[in-house]
Image (tube, coloured by chain):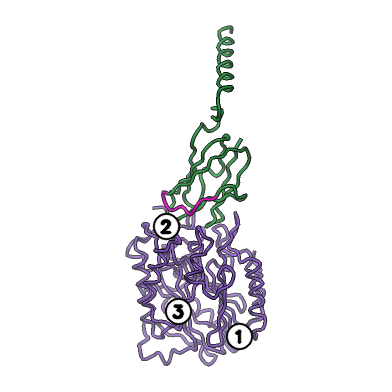
Chain colours: A purple, B green
């Protein structure tokens, strides 16, 4: 593992250092947009309704993840309620998202009633469409048949697909099927062949957004947080000037920039999980009740055409989001203070 | 000495009689006894991770974790449905051999049952 893309930095007039600094602010409720090649930042709290013209990127969408409808243990006895808070947050965004991406673990046990509850809740999102990829919790017992019947129309194979929106090419990948003993997430030969063909004829200036459940980079292999054959997929995307990879599965925000590829994982709307290595295992992490909404959240993404960068803002459900670096140092992830196992 | 020898002989005789009359019950030596042995699933691990049993033993996995898991043999010998907290799955191992298995939801979780 570890065959990441190493390429020269973009010669697109964007101050890379400034951009990376802005990315590190993701989660403070700072909106970073590239407009006219210049990086601008806006504090979310300072944004009023009449600012939406100022904030216009060319494409805005939201990522949510890991709703785990059906989960009811102490880490969060009411995941439907926290999902609703997330939906309210989406509906309160200053710029209406064109669509919502759900990066998997829609349900907790792949039960029909759980999918029904999710669908019912998502009806109230103010957006154009919702696109899904499955998590491992969505394909239990039936190899994903029920998931595909509900959410996989017009998809190929185990549920992969692509679509275009405002000149950006979106690719939904499935890396939770046919997992091998001792292994990580896997894309498989058929899907990789499809991907190679799918992007072959696109111009290298086309912005690419790939979304899949398990991270496509090696976050923490000991806990299965990675995808075995992701390097091959990323190889097919090497020619593109801007590639963004959006994942879920780990129930916390992690971000990595490698040349033209930005990797980002989202918070869950259901329960948090411990930071890598800070607990005996990656299960649901119980936090004090009044802290729960501070570790769940949504991801708002804005893209300005021609600027090759996405502005990614993670907002927690209680709105008092902290910066990416602050989250890493927070007592929540201190092993001594971790309530895991309680 | 004689008494001990006699006792030993008696024990051996009793043992061999039991051996010829028994059907499927395993030898009650240092290994697991007859009937059911339990493997606990907790904290994303199987406990004991390596279990040794005699042929004919029924092994029951119990999920004590707060997240669902499965028990899937790598050679298609047995396969559970998704087990939520407190759910169980049992399999009786008739044939000697070594049976690797894992959780298909969290494939880093692996275990083994040795039947001999």
Q: Chain of mark 3?
A: A
Q: Nearer the viewer, residue A298 or A108?
A: A108
Q: Which residue is mark 1?
A: A206
Which label is found at residue A338? 2
Decide: marks 3, 1 in contact (CB < 8 A)? no
Specify start and end residues of the magenta stretch as a single range: B79-86
Depth check, mark 1 against mark 2: the one in front is 1
Q: Nearer the viewer, mark 3 or mark 1?
A: 1
* Magenta stretch prevailing secondary structure: loop
Residue at image coords 55%, 17%: B14
The alpha-carbon separation of the residues under discs 2 and 3 comes to 28 Å
- In the rendered image of this protein, does residue A144 appear above or below residue A242? above
Q: Residue at x 34, y 68 (%)?
A: A81
Mark 1, other Cα within 10 Å: few <14 / some 14–19 / many ≥20: some
**Residue A113 in the image: x percent, y percent?**
39, 63
**Alpha-carbon neighbours of circle 3 within 10 Å: few (<14), some, or many (≥20)?**
many
How far across and down, in percent of the image, does residue A276 sit? 51, 61
Q: Earlier in the sequence, mark 1 or mark 2?
A: 1
- Rendered view: B92 above or below A269: above
């Amino acid at each position: 593992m570890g065959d990441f893309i190493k390429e020269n930095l973009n010669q697109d007039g964007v101050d890379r250092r400034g951009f990376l600094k802005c990315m590190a602010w993701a989660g403070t409720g700072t909106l970073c947009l590239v407009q006219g090649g210049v990086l601008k930042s806006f504090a979310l709290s300072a944004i009023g309704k009449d600012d939406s013209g100022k904030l216009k990127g060319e494409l805005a969408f939201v990522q949510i993840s890991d709703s785990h409808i059906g989960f009811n243990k102490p880490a969060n006895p009411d995941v439907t309620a926290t999902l609703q808070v997330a939906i309210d947050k989406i509906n309160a965004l200053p710029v209406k998202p064109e669509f919502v991406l759900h990066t998997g673990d829609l349900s907790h046990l792949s039960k029909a009633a759980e999918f029904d509850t999710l669908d019912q809740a998502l009806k109230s999102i103010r957006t154009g469409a919702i696109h899904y990829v499955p998590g491992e919790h969505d394909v239990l017992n039936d190899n994903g048949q029920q998931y595909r019947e509900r959410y996989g129309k017009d998809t190929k194979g185990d549920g992969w697909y692509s679509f275009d929106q405002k000149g950006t090419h979106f690719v939904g990948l499935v890396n939770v099927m046919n997992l091998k003993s001792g292994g990580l997430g896997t894309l498989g030969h058929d899907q990789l062949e499809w991907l190679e063909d799918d992007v072959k004829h696109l111009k290298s200036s086309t912005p690419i957004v790939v979304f899949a459940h398990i991270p496509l980079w090696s976050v923490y292999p000991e806990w299965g947080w990675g995808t075995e054959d992701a390097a091959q997929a990323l190889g097919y995307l090497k020619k593109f000037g801007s590639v963004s990879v959006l994942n879920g599965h780990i129930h916390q925000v992690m971000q990595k920039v490698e040349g033209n590829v930005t990797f980002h994982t989202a918070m869950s709307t259901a329960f948090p999980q411990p930071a890598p290595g800070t607990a005996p295992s990656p299960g649901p992490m119980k936090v004090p009740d009044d802290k729960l909404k501070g570790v769940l959240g949504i991801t708002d993404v804005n893209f300005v055409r021609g600027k090759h960068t996405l502005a990614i803002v993670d907002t927690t459900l209680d709105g008092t989001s902290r910066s990416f670096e602050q989250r890493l140092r927070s007592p929540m992830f201190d092993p001594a203070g971790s309530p895991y196992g309680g | 000495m004689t008494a001990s020898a006699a006792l030993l002989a008696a024990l051996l005789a009793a043992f061999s009689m039991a051996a010829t009359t028994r059907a499927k019950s395993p030898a009650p030596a240092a290994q697991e006894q007859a009937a059911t042995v339990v493997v606990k699933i907790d904290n994303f691990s199987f406990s004991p991770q390596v279990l040794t049993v005699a042929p004919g033993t029924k092994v029951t996995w119990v999920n004590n974790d707060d997240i669902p898991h499965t028990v899937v043999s790598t050679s298609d010998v047995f396969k559970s449905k998704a087990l939520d907290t407190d759910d169980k799955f049992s399999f009786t191992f008739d044939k000697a051999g070594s049976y690797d298995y894992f959780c298909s939801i969290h494939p880093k979780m692996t275990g083994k049952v040795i039947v001999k």
